[in-house]
Each structure stands twice: as C-alpha cells, then as structure tokens.
Image (spheres, helix red, strand yellow):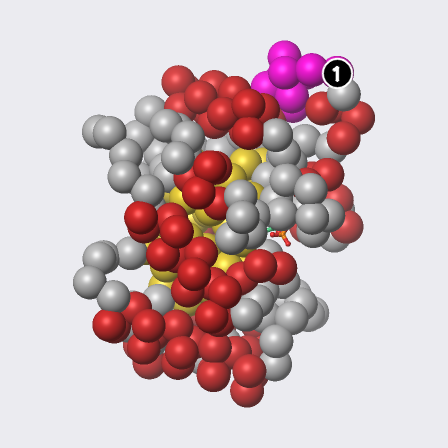
Amino acid sequence: MITAANFKVNHTRESTASYLEALNLFLDAYSTHCDVRVYPAASSFLKADLYPHVKLGAQNFYPAVNGAYTGEIGSQQLNEFGIKNVLIGHSERRVTLRETQDFIAKKYAFAKENGWEIIYCIGEPKDVRRNGFEAVAQYLLDEFEDIDTDYDKLSIAYEPIWAIGTGVSAEIKDIAEVLDMLKSRFKSTPLLYGGSVNTENLRQIISLKSCGGALIGNAALDAANFCKLIQIAQNVQKEE
Ligand code: 13P
C-alpha cells in the first residue's frame, strides 16, 4: 500500500524538516511495513537518508543531468539529496505549466534511465467526465502515449482534475470503474487514487479491489493527519 503526500507549493524548509522528523518517528514505531512517500517543494529538499522510513521525492525535474535550463533542476541536483522518486504528469503541470505529452514522455524516459520510482499521474477534466466513462477511459489512455508502462518501478495515480483541491472527491463507483479499467491493462502496476482524499473517505477508496494507495495533497500537509491517513490505509486488509 502506497501513501504519498504531495506538498505542492506548501511548507518551508524548516517546516518540512519538522514534518519529516515527526513522520519518520511515527513510522519507526509502527510495526507494519509501509511505502510512504513525501514530495516536498524543491527548495525544501533534505538528504533522503535522514529519514529512512520515508521515500523523499521530487514533484518535478528537467530531463537532463544539468545544463542551461533556467529555473529547473536536473538529476545532479536530485542525486545530491539521494532522491530517487518522482512525480510525472501531474495535471497541475500538464494544465497550468503547459507540459505536453511529448515532454512528459521525455521526463518519463529520463526517470526510467535513472532507475527512479515514478508515480505517473493521469486525470480527466470535468467536461470529459460529463461525457461518461468511455470518454474518460479514452482520455486517460491517451495520456499514456509514449510511456513504457512495463517499467517495474512505476505506479499510476488516477487524479480527476476536478476533484483535486476542491474538497469533492470523485464518486466511489467512478473511481472503481476507472481503477478496474486500468488494472485490466496494467496488471501488476500499483494504482493510486488522488483528489480530495481525507480521513473520512480514504478507507472506502483504499478498500476498492484495484486500489493500491493514495496520493494526497491538502489532507497530508499536517504531519499528524498524514500519519492518521497512513494508519487508515494500512488497516485495510485486501484479499490477494
Ligand atoms: P488534494 O488532496 O489537495 O485534492 O490534491 C491531490 C493531488 O493533486 C495530489 O497530487
């Protein structure tokens, strides 16, 4: 079960350090093995080995070791912190930052070459959702263009755009339908859901048979709340 916190543009370096310390302590005392990932802002990166129970990740990177890419960071910068986990394809980068599928595929290939764990994000806008499941499925599958889904360090996060940061999660039957469709295609790849996940709705979402975790924004910004979310996720028993 993967529980991941995407900080987006939140927390300072100082508050990220206190957060990670609290989280690592909590996980140290927790008896179950958990795959817990935290994606802080790049200015708050800390050495990954300071927090052995947490996988520190990057929300973004440029697909190059280093070079003339003003404002970006490459693998040289990530390596300095021992960061080996990345998010790719988040809708905020696809839509607000205008990343094209072609560029996203380049980032993906670069991450794969480096052997990084990837959470690859996909999600449809509201107007596509209004057209029903077939339209959603087609939209989501198009977001896999030039993506090697056989990569063994890949997880996929389904995050409907209209459910992100709105406080309104997708309906459980709609999440189930999409995750089942993805499972039928990408059999061994862990599938996550993201979009207004909180302590009230996580149990039901994670109980879905095709759901292997959650990618959480707002509700994960508080360390104690993220620990609660981890416990909820871990407590759900799945039939193999
Ligand atoms: P929220 O949990 O704030 O809706 O954000 C979800 C998200 O975008 C995680 O990547």
Q: Is residue 22 left or right of 39 when viewed as pictured?
A: left
Q: Which residues are magenta?
A: 131-139
Q: Which residue is found at the position 63% from the left and 67% from the top? A: 72
Q: Where residue 150 sits: x, y (%)?
A: 35, 31
Q: Quadrant of the C terminus?
A: top left
Q: Is residue 136 magenta?
A: yes
* Residue 25 position (above or below residue 197): below
Q: Where residue 152 sits: x, y (%)?
A: 30, 39
Q: Is residue 33 left or right of 66 when viewed as pictured?
A: left
Q: Is residue 21 left or right of 124 when viewed as pictured?
A: left
Residue that lies at the very extreme toward the front in this rendered image = 200
* Main SS, magenta residues: helix
Q: Which residue is found at the position 63% from the left and 40% from the top? A: 169
In this view, the residue in front, 108 or 158, is: 158
- Provide the residue designation for mark 1: 131
Viewer can see residue 157: no
In this view, the residue in front, 85 or 29, is: 29
* Residue 185 position (above or below residue 53): above
Q: Where residue 99 sits: x, y (%)?
A: 69, 46
Q: Which residue is found at the position 46% from the left and 37% from the top? A: 204
**Element under label 1?**
loop
Viewer can see residue 223: yes
Q: Which residue is found at the position 63% from the left and 12% from the top? A: 134
Q: Where residue 8 sits: x, y (%)?
A: 63, 62
